[in-house]
Image: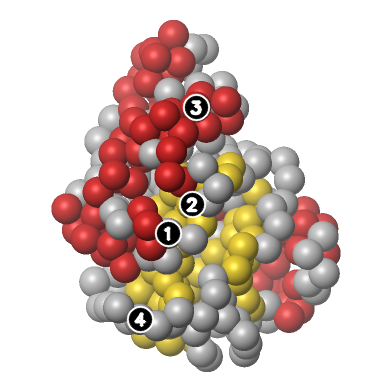
Amino acid sequence: MSLRFAILGSGSQGNALVIETASVRILVDCGFPAREIERRLSGLGIEADSLTAILVTHEHADHVRGLGPLARRYGIPVWMTAGTFHGANYGKLPTLHQIDSHTGWWSIGDLAVAPYPVPHDSREPCQFLFRAGGGTLGLLTDTGYITPHIAGILQACDSLVLEFNHDSQMLANGPYPPSLQARVGGSHGHLNNHQAVGLLKRLQTSRLQHVVASHLSEKNNSPGLVTELVLQQLPDLSDRFSIASQHDITDWFRLPLTQPV
């Protein structure tokens, strides 16, 4: 079995993504209450007690809200950076593995994992690459801008979950106070639509089997704007592009068996 993934929900109210291989089932972030995570997992036919591990990108509530209760309820090991651990109170975790986002690849069962650092307003945030069966999935959300390191890391991707947080004009004209606008649109905030498209233009889009837009702001963006921009700038992605919802789980995305390059 090659790698497959599904998004349980993505946005400011909560984020979680599940990845499966032949031997492991990983939850990345746990930003909904534990009972809601269980409900959304069940929509994919998954029981929470079958999770192998939970990986955490950073300590903001929309990524860790249900982490402590879910991990304790089912004895699920948790992986996160030291800064993320010290950035919030999760209660007692059954098993904690502290990771360094600069160490390169390591493994959980047959799933290879490579965390990498990103600029975001949290203690020690990271994002991840995942590899199994010759296919590589990249995750990039909650970052203020694209560093050369990020662009280089994501060249390896066969599929990408990518933040399209806000439309800059909607953010400037929207309901957020100036301080929050500055935070969201700043260098340690969130990617806007044009930044995300700019990254895609730097990647080998012919290689990408899936591009999933994620973490859309419900007040400062719209699926229509995102779709229009992507189809205008990158029309070759039209049949491989989709948008994750805050309120609904996605279907499974599968990475067919491919040979590493």
Whether 104 is drawn above or below 171: the answer is below
Q: Position of residue 9 (x, y in %)?
A: 65, 49
Mark 1 — residue? Answer: 208
Mark 4 — residue? Answer: 260
Q: Residue at x 55, y 48 (%)?
A: 239
Q: Amino acid at mark 1?
A: Leu
Mark 2 — residue? Answer: 211
Q: CA distance from mark 2 to mark 3?
A: 15 Å
Horizontal side, residue 110 vs residue 121: left or right: right
Q: CA distance from mark 4 to mark 3?
A: 32 Å
CB of mark 2 within 8 Å of CB of mark 1?
A: yes
Q: Amino acid at mark 2?
A: Val
Q: Residue at x 76, y 78 (%)?
A: 49
Mark 3 — residue? Answer: 228
Horizontal side, residue 92 vs residue 229: left or right: right
CB of mark 4 within 8 Å of CB of mark 3?
A: no
Query: In the rendered image, which quarter is residue 172 located in?
Result: top left
Quadrant where the N terminus sits is: bottom right
Q: Closer to the N terminus: mark 2 or mark 4?
A: 2
Neighbours of disc 4 within 10 Å: few (<14), some (14-19), many (20+): few
Q: Closer to the N terminus: mark 4 or mark 1?
A: 1
Query: In the rendered image, which quarter is residue 92 located in?
Result: bottom right
Q: CA distance from mark 4 to mark 1?
A: 13 Å
Horizontal side, residue 169 vs residue 117: left or right: right
Seen from this angle, which residue lies furthest front?
A: 236
